[in-house]
Image (cartoon, coloured by chain):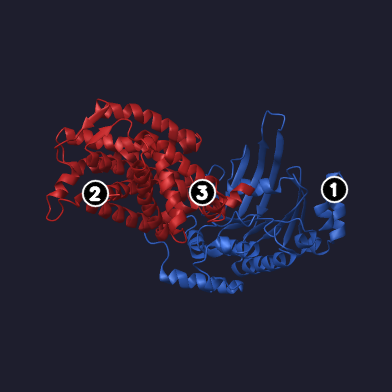
Chain colours: A blue, B red
Amino acid sequence: MLSVRKILKTFNKGTINEKQALNGISLQLAAGDFVTVIGSNGAGKSTLLNSIAGDFLIDQGEIRIASYEITGWPQYKRASLVSRVFQDPMRGTAASMTIEENMVMALRRGQSRRLRRAISVKEREYFRGELRKLGLGLEDRLTNKVSLLSGGQRQALTLLMATLREPKLILLDEHTAALDPKTAEKVLDLTCRVAAENRLTTLMITHNLDHALSVGNRTIMMHEGRIILDLREGERANMTINRLFEMFEKASGSHIHNDRMILA
Amino acid sequence: MSWQVFSGTLEQGLMYAIMVLGVYLTFRVLDYADLTVDGSFTLGAAIAARLIFSGQNPWLASGLAFLGGLLAGAFTGVLHTKFKITPLLSGILTMTALYSVNLRIMGRPNIPLLRLRTIFSDVAQLPFMERYGVLVLSLITVLILGHFLYLFLETEIGIALRATGDNEVMIRSQGVNTDRMKILGLSLSNGMVAFAGSYVAQNQQFADASMGIGMIIAGLASVIIGEVLIGTTTIRRTILAVIFGAVVYRVIIALVLQLGLAPTDLKLVTSIIVIIALTSPGIKKRIFTRSGSRVGKEEN
């Protein structure tokens, strides 16, 4: 479903701040794979996701989704294949617009937009049904502005929006990190549920080593723009958080000074 | 204030409201402070005046003024999106260029339209329209344009345009080419502004190369006044608010003139109104936390 081949990306080339963010990384995802991505800050996890989504073009390499070679596609064009949820709940929704307006934008993801009334009665009913499944009481608030929602509600809405029009690939960039622990669990449960229901191909960055092993069917660890560990099936089932932690130290050859990771 | 002064003020307010709808579209909906307005307002007046002066149909002339504004807005949009020039500078560049363009179009610094056929002289010939023709035509125009703007902002494209102003990252990730949306918004906005310019020129019966100076600030003042007085809970309400704001702004200006201030002081008064609106905490809060998006942007 997703094929990333030997991609290179350097930021601020030729300046003192030059940073090789992706260092010839390759990754293949089969349809329905749910891959968790871990790694310390600066390992290139977000850069990987952003380069797939098309925030910038890569320097070298190739990105394919399904049968499309999207390496040179602008971001808005990739939206027909990829949907994403950001860490910051503010980024995934338009605050001054209503819940139903936000949802209809997501329902038209990757389609050409026309000069016709945006929301039909039928679609409104559909939105209500989908919102009811979230169990957050949002189904009665279709015409409320999104700015009135809490961070957790907004993130749940963003997640729902990301799946309304089934994407080939969904990118989750620490999408529960900005939420309180209880809400984070709820949103993660929801993530697992919708991913399983729709058999979504998913790439999820997390800082929580427990989630990294318990969620999805495959775990990769990144360091300095490369994948240094790729766990599947039996190997993954036998992995413990402590051993994963040790492997990280060993494989990367450096000590982790990121307390977020240690405390996770 | 005598009735005559008041109805004149009302006429002006409604005519300028057409321009304010355009300013609302860029300043509020797209979150883009577009200074092209000063140039495109005059552009509309220049196109209409030149055509009317050379004997063309005034309705056609007004329509072409609208088209001229569309082009001016598109030019600013291309400067900003394709060549990555900042919003403010893109607008200033177009505005400055338009000053020369407008003089070229007119062929001289001003064109008188006395005793020529205008859209208002046409309407004045209809029954009962002799006295209130200007008022009625301006009112109908602004209501129709306001209604179309409202309908447009509720369409799929309109929603994408609003989202471009609210959260560009989000709407791009939903597959919208935000560059195109900005060019579209700037075009429509300046089209309306130029249209307003053609109305004002025909009503005052002359066009002048400097008639657009300070137009953007007058537009902002009108938008802010309307939003504070009427509120912004829905799109429909906000559009009515900015139309109302345009009228109130003209009333304030008329009152200031009645108090004995010289017309040359008006720009100062307008700036002071906007400064007060932007600095007084109560009003500021009402305007800038309206959506939450502006607050969000400051955090980023």
Identify the element where label 2 is drawn. Answer: helix
The span from disc 1 to disc 2 (Cα, nearest Å) is 79 Å
The chain ID associated with circle 1 is A
The chain ID associated with circle 2 is B
Identified by mark 2, the residue type is Gln
Q: In this orientation, which residue lies closer to the viewer: A64 or B131? A: B131
> Is the residue A246 above or below the residue A156 in the image?
above
Q: Give yes or no for contact between labels 1 and 2 (Cβ–Cβ under 8 Å).
A: no
Identify the element where label 3 is drawn. Answer: helix
Q: Which residue is mark 3?
A: A76
* Residue at the image position 40 percent from the left and 44 percent from the top: B219
Q: In the picture, residue A212 is in which quadrant?
A: bottom right
Residue B174: horizontal and vertical position, in percent? 52, 54
Of mark 1 and mark 3, the one earlier in the sequence is 3
Identified by mark 3, the residue type is Tyr
Identified by mark 1, the residue type is Ile
Residue B172: horizontal and vertical position, in percent? 52, 50
The chain ID associated with circle 3 is A
Q: In this orientation, which residue lies closer to the viewer: B208 or A30? A: B208
Q: Quadrant of the N terminus of chain A?
A: bottom right
Q: Which residue is mark 1?
A: A256
Q: Are marks 1 and 3 on the same chain?
A: yes
Residue B4 numbered tag: 2
Q: Are marks 2 and 3 on the same chain?
A: no
Check disc 1: other Cα within 10 Å, few if <14, some if 14-19, many if 20+. some
* Residue at the image position 83 percent from the left and 61 percent from the top: A239
Total marks shown come to: 3
Residue A114 visible at all: no
* Residue at the image position 43 percent from the left and 49 percent from the top: B223
Residue B29: horizontal and vertical position, in percent? 45, 50
Q: In this orientation, which residue lies closer to the viewer: B202 or B80? A: B202
